[in-house]
Amino acid sequence: PDPDRTPGLQIRALSDLQFGIAVQGDALKTVPPGTAEDPANASFRVRGRRFTNYAIVLPTAPIFLVTGAQGPLERIRVDQWISFPSEGANGYLGANREQLVLVGATRDTILSNQVVGAYTGTFVVPVVYP
């Protein structure tokens, strides 16, 4: 089959967004997307038709990192999503038919009475041909 006739885009997560270790009372923390993979940013590989633009869609609402029973003191808000390339029709697949997309976000302040634990969450980054 002709590789230029790939009907859709594929996106695959390579690494997770990591806010690191935090303690009760820590200030909010922003992980920038950066321009290369690092231990904190999330990274994705996008594949599709060569020499084609595509759009990156970031979450429009916050997500919550949760632990335990997910009560009010077992949730941490994450929002202010940013990507490289920038959100919108800014992705471009070159001759190799792929591009690395990096994502960062801001984690809210850790409450002084926040439950101690390992917090996890998920978010979705759709990519579409415009």
Image (cartoon, helix red, strand yellow):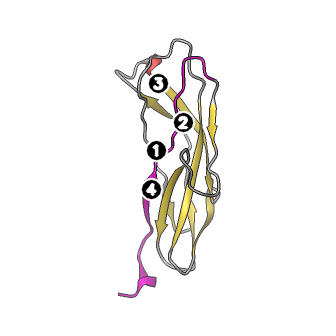
Amino acid bearing label 1: Phe
Residue 83 rendering spot, x and y as whole percentages = 61, 53
1 or 4: tag closer to the N-terminus: 4
The residue at the point 51 percent across, 12 percent down is: 113
3 or 4: tag closer to the N-terminus: 4
Q: Mark 1 or 4, which is nearer the eye?
A: 4
The residue at the point 43 percent across, 55 percent down is: 13
Q: Which mark is residue 75?
A: 3
1 or 3: tag closer to the N-terminus: 3
Mark 1 and mark 2: span between their CA atoms?
14 Å
Q: Which mark is residue 123?
A: 1
Query: Where is mark 4, residue-wise?
Result: 14
3 or 2: tag closer to the N-terminus: 2
Residue 130 rendering spot, x and y as whole percentages = 56, 68
Query: Where is mark 2, residue-wise?
Result: 19
Instruction: Kindly indicate whether the residue at mark 4 contacts the one at mark 2 (C-beta within 8 angstroms).
Output: no
Q: Mark 3 or 2, which is nearer the eye?
A: 2
Mark 3 and mark 4: span between their CA atoms?
25 Å
Q: Which residues are magenta?
A: 1-26
Mark 1 and mark 4: span between their CA atoms?
14 Å
Mark 3 and mark 2: span between their CA atoms?
14 Å
Secondary structure of residue under mark 4: strand
Q: Which mark is residue 21?
A: none
Q: Is residue 14 above or below residue 53?
A: above
Amino acid bearing label 4: Leu
2 or 4: tag closer to the N-terminus: 4
Instruction: Kindly indicate whether the residue at mark 4 contacts the one at mark 3 (C-beta within 8 angstroms).
Output: no
Secondary structure of residue under mark 1: loop
Amino acid bearing label 2: Phe
